[in-house]
Image (cartoon, rainbow, N blue to C red):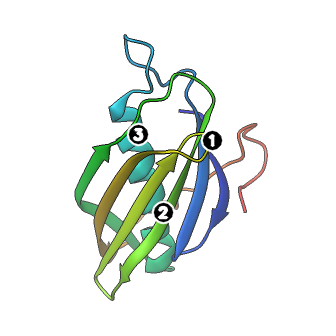
Amino acid sequence: MGVTIVEQSAERVVATMPVEGNRQSFGLLHGGASVAFAEALGSWAAVIHAGPGRSAVGLDINATHHLAARSGIVTGVATAIRLGRTITCHEIVISDDQGRRLCTARITNLIVDAPDRPPFVPRAQDGATPVD
């Protein structure tokens, strides 16, 4: 998907994704790619909120597609609606390079005890260094 994290906290995650490589057969940004992008941002914010020893699993996601994109880079901004002890909810707005809203999504995550395995660590696009 080519996602690059720009900013991250429980309250707000910002990332970019190229349209190239994420198109459907008519040459438009695939709606499923937009939803997967939104889910990744909202879930990552929920995992940050969960903290050490905890994780997040998706309960619900919905999306409305407003406009199409054919090229360029899209930006997703996940903003917390509710950061609770067991449930988080984030709104994700995906915009094109001109700032036009392409998609609005909302995700609800359940905070759970983390499974017994090494945590996922996002990497920079070159794979060399952790994303801060």
| Label 1 Cα neighbours within 10 Å, binned few <14 / some 14-19 / many ≥20 | few
Task: Please tell me which of labels 1 and 2 falls first in the chain.
Answer: 2
**Front one among 2 and 81:** 81
For image coordinates 31% across by 61% down, the residue present is: 107
Q: Earlier in the sequence, mark 3 or mark 2?
A: 3
Depth check, mark 1 against mark 2: the one in front is 1
Q: Looking at the picture, does residue 37 appear above or below residue 57?
A: above
Marks 1 and 2, Cα distance to the nearest angstrom? Answer: 18 Å
**Secondary-structure class at tag 2:** strand
Q: Amino acid at mark 3?
A: Ser
Residue that mark 2 sits on? 78
Q: Quadrant of the C terminus?
A: bottom right
Q: Is any atom of residue 3 visible in this view?
A: no
Give the structural element (helix, strand or loop) at label 1: loop
Counting from the top left corner in percent of width and height, residue 71 is at 58, 23
Q: Which residue is mark 3?
A: 34
Height in image: 121 above or below 70? below
- Quadrant in the rendering for residue 55: bottom left
Residue drawn at (33%, 34%), measured in percent from left and top?
32
Toward the top, the furthest residue is 25
In this rendering, is residue 102 above or below 42?
above
Q: Quadrant of residue 28?
A: top left
Q: Which residue is mark 1?
A: 98
x, y percent for residue 58: 27, 60
| Residue type, numbered disc 2 | Ala
The amino acid at mark 1 is Gln
Provide the secondary structure element on which disc 3 rests. helix
Q: Residue at x 42, y 70 (%)?
A: 46
